[in-house]
Image: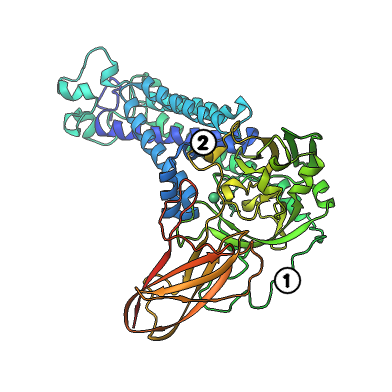
């Protein structure tokens, strides 16, 4: 029997715990509803993606480089998990706060909705205030749910005019945190006692049934909304996926010469000469890989010195003469010895041809624009020198990679590739707009973040095998790797053992000066610890500098070394 005639509010640790649980449920509901609403707006407008994207936009280069080093291509997953962890803690705290100040908890949830909304509308790819909707609607639902759930716990001591519990320690009551010891015996003594006030027993009592019902219903509804949102967001990519499987790449009118025999060495542990698409490094700011439908995709070319603006469809591009070239791509964030470099066979339209069609002239021929700004569907801006893309090199709008339409991660349907320039100043993925302008007039995404405006690729070489801290056997050890100096080519690679003399490595046959070059050096290894160092000389005769520079602002330099112990 209930020995307590008047319904009592829930107190103490139990109240706090259920408050925390309410906070969690409210947060979960907010995110789930936001996911569902984002399916109606844009997948990228959901709060987690938006806040993650905003965080990426604001990450100092040093932290970004650190994250890339630590987590590699998992950096984005780590970021999203981090955001979810922070949101979880905030939800728990807001839930506990709400047990004392019911309205504060809900206002807190709304405040985070505002943060999400600002992040979503402030992203470079946001074109509409509707991007705020997922965060706002989610937060309103979450705030309402928290208010309702906390209401089921009954009024807290703080919210009644005077403490009615004679046992309550004023200091404890002040913080709203009652220890179990200070709980009325009726609440802590027998389970259920004083907790059974039904819906009819007044608003200030602990409504156990109401709480459990509401909490269960909210959890179920949130899960439903979240899953539905996921499914809808996923299906939006389906037309893009279908458009990609429908692509038939035409033959190139200017095919790449076959890779010469002897360009690809068969040495265990060396990077393959052609990097398979599935192994190709990926560097971008996109938390959600843009899924662009090639059948509705358009590219606009406009700006200074453009006599005839051009708008092209994907089919228009495929009907033009295509060039096919092997080109090695490198990221400016690649550390000495790092993995962000890969070689692929690209097929696409020569960019200079398109620009000439529009009447564009390079600065050396009196053209007014010295910067070509490429814009992607996700708001990335990448600026290349007009002079470089029109100087005869094979700068292209690529539609294919290693014989396949571009993978979504690598820019489907169309991306730029310019031999000799780091990716952040040349290789815009998911491109949709090309604007001719000047370096003075416009700073692109990474330039705004202190990276250099112009960044030709620095000569680098890398030891692929043996691996750092490897334990090869004494005798002949094949030291091998790759060297690159795109558009200048590699003329020489040398290896040094410890402080010994530089020895010339055997170079694999050069494919083109736009591709990396493999090398090998048979080393007569003696027992003990050794340091192997490599350096390359480019086609102009300039030897790779020993001077170590950080990746920012225009790429790392220095010699790659590997320490091994010979057994
Ligand atoms: N839209 C878009 N394009 C982008 C980027 C990006 O963040 N967004 N990153 C650039 C950088 S820094 C590099 S190194 C190359 C990497 O291309 P990949 O991921 O296909 O290897 O893409 C470039 N193009
Ligand atoms: Mo990059």
Q: Nearer the viewer, residue 134 or 314?
A: 314
Q: Check whether the beta carbons of the residues at disc 1 and disc 2 lie within 8 A of each other.
A: no
Q: Nearer the viewer, residue 74 or 154?
A: 74
State how far apart marks 1 and 2 are (Cα): 41 Å
**Mark closest to the chain's N terminus, 1 or 2:** 1
**Which quadrant is home to the C terminus?**
bottom left
Q: Is residue 223 above or below residue 564?
A: above
As drawn, which residue projects farthest toward the top?
A: 161
Q: Is residue 242 above or below residue 107?
A: below
Q: Would residue 308 appear left or right of 421 to someone viewing this image?
A: right
Name the residue carrying label 1: 258
User: In the rendering, at what x and y percent does residue 195 appear?
Assistant: 31, 30
User: In the rendering, at what x and y percent does residue 154 appear?
Assistant: 33, 23
- Which mark is drawn over residue 146? none
Q: Would residue 382 appear left or right of 171 to someone viewing this image?
A: right
As drawn, which residue projects farthest toward the right?
A: 319
Q: Nearer the viewer, residue 419 or 537?
A: 537
Report the coloring of the rendering.
Answer: rainbow
Which element type, helix, strand or loop, lies under badge 2?
helix
- At x 82%, y 58%, the residue is 250
Q: What is the total number of numbered labels drawn onto the structure image?
A: 2
Q: Is residue 186 visible?
A: yes
User: In the rendering, at what x and y percent does residue 455 appear?
Assistant: 55, 48
Q: Is residue 526 above or below residue 232?
A: below
Name the residue carrying label 2: 448
Which element type, helix, strand or loop, lies under badge 1?
loop
Quadrant in the rendering for residue 110: top left
Q: Nearer the viewer, residue 478 or 33?
A: 478
- At x 77%, y 41%, the residue is 296
Q: Residues within 10 Å of mark 1 (few under 14, many from 20)?
A: few
User: In the rendering, at what x and y percent does residue 132 appear?
Assistant: 56, 27
Task: Say if disc 2 is inside 8 Å of ligand 1.
Answer: no
């Amino acid at each position: 029997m209930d020995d307590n005639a008047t319904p009592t509010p829930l107190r103490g640790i139990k109240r706090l715990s259920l408050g925390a649980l309410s906070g969690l449920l409210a947060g979960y509901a907010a995110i789930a509803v936001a996911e569902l609403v984002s399916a109606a707006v844009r997948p990228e407008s959901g709060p987690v993606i938006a806040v993650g994207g905003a965080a990426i936009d604001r990450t100092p280069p040093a932290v970004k480089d650190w994250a890339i080093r630590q987590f590699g291509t998992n950096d984005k997953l780590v970021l999203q998990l981090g955001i979810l962890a922070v949101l979880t803690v905030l939800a728990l705290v807001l839930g506990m706060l709400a047990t004392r100040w019911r309205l504060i908890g809900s206002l807190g949830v709304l405040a985070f909705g505002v943060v999400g909304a600002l992040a979503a509308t402030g992203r470079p790819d946001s074109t509409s205030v509707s991007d705020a909707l997922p965060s706002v609607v989610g937060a309103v639902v979450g705030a309402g749910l928290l208010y309702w759930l906390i209401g089921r716990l009954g009024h807290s001591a703080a919210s009644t005019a005077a403490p009615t519990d004679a046992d309550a320690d004023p200091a404890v009551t002040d913080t709203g945190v009652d220890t179990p010891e200070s709980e009325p015996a009726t609440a802590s003594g027998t389970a259920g006692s004083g907790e059974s006030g039904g819906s009819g027993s007044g608003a200030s009592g602990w409504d156990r049934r109401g709480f459990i019902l509401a909490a269960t219903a909210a959890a179920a509804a949130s899960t439903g909304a979240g899953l539905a949102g996921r499914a809808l967001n996923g299906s939006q990519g389906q037309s893009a996926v279908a458009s990609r499987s429908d692509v038939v790449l035409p033959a190139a009118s200017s095919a790449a010469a076959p890779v010469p025999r002897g360009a690809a060495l068969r040495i265990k542990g060396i990077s393959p000469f052609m990097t398979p698409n599935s192994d190709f490094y990926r560097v971008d700011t996109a938390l959600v890989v843009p899924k662009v439908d090639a059948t509705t995709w358009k590219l606009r070319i406009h700006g200074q010195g453009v006599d005839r603006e051009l708008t092209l469809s994907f089919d228009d591009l495929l009907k033009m003469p295509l060039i096919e070239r092997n080109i090695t791509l490198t990221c400016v964030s690649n550390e000495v010895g790092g993995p962000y470099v890969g070689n692929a066979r690209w097929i696409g339209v020569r960019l200079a041809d398109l620009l000439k069609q529009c009447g564009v002239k390079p600065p050396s021929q009196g053209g007014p624009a010295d910067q070509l700004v490429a814009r992607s569907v996700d708001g990335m801006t990448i600026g290349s020198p007009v002079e470089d893309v029109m100087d005869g090199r094979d700068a292209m709008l690529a539609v294919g990679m290693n014989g396949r339409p571009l993978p979504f991660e690598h820019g489907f349907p169309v991306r730029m590739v310019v031999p000799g320039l780091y990716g952040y100043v040349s290789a815009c993925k998911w491109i949709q707009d090309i604007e001719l302008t000047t370096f003075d007039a416009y700073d692109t995404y990474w330039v705004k973040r202190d990276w250099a405006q112009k960044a030709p690729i620095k000569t680098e070489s890398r030891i692929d095998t043996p691996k750092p801290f490897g334990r090869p056997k004494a005798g002949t050890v094949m030291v091998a790797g790759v060297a690159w100096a795109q558009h200048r080519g590699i003329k020489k690679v040398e290896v040094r053992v410890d402080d010994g003399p530089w020895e010339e490595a055997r170079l694999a046959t050069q494919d083109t000066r736009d591709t990396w070059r493999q090398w090998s050096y048979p080393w007569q290894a003696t027992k003990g610890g050794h340091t192997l160092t490599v350096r390359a000389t480019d086609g102009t005769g300039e030897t790779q500098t020993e001077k170590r520079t950080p990746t920012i602002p225009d790429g790392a330099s220095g010699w790659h070394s590997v320490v091994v112990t010979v057994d």
